[in-house]
Image (cartoon, rainbow, N blue to C red):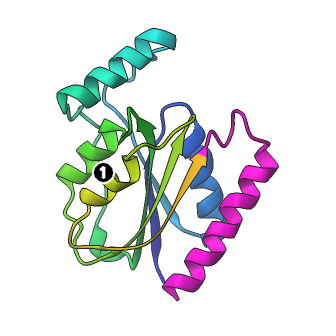
Amino acid sequence: MKTVIVYYSCDGNCAFAAKQIGKTLKADIIQVQLTDEKKRHGASKMFWGIMQIMSGALPAIKPVNFDAEAYDLIILGAPVWASSPAPAIRTFLSQTKISGKKIALFMCHGGGMGKAMEKFKALLEGNSIVTEIDLNSPVKFINIEKSKEQIDNWTEVLAKTTA
């Protein structure tokens, strides 16, 4: 089964998860990146993120070389911002035709998911969501080995589910 992981990461949590999943599943990995690479920190980062969500903004992203038809399984990953998937992944999905595919989702958050996973799924109508996982700050507050174990257990279930 040909698998790809497409993710956006702001603080490295989703990047860590994508690399761990990719290593386990031997998947292609594509990182969604903003064209605006300005590094925001602290309150300004939080304010910027909340304004993106509240305004429904679709920020510009760098071109992504992606053909959904080339893959049997598409794994999508995003951080949770204000109980929603990060705007960059929404931009990617608005620019990409994905239909009739098996999809697995992962989201990274620093405390709460809210309705983020439901909102993520709503962006993928016409596809089959086979499994999902939420990861609480996999590289910040939790022991990295425990995060790796959680991800590896999930990928094992994912492999069985999609076989």
**Residue drawn at x 30%, y 29% as measured from the top left:** 35
Percent position of residue 62, x then y: 30, 38
Could you say which is closer to the camera, residue 25 or residue 51? Answer: 51
Residue 75 magenta-drawn?
A: no
Work out whether 2 lies above or below 41: below
Q: Give the magenta part as a residue range.
A: 136-163
User: At which x and y percent is residue 151?
Assistant: 66, 60
Q: Magenta span has 152?
A: yes
**Front-most of residues 47 and 67:** 47
Residue 92 is situated, as x and y percent measured from the top left of the image, at: 27, 48
Q: Residues within 10 Å of mark 1 (few under 14, many from 20)?
A: few
> Residue sitting at 61 percent across and 54 percent down?
19
Q: Which residue lies at the image location 27% right of the left edge and 45% below the top edge?
A: 90
Q: Secondary structure at mark 1?
A: helix
| Residue in the picture at 38% in, 32% down | 82
Q: Which residue is mark 1?
A: 119
Going by the numbered disc 1, the residue's amino acid type is Lys
Q: How many marks?
A: 1
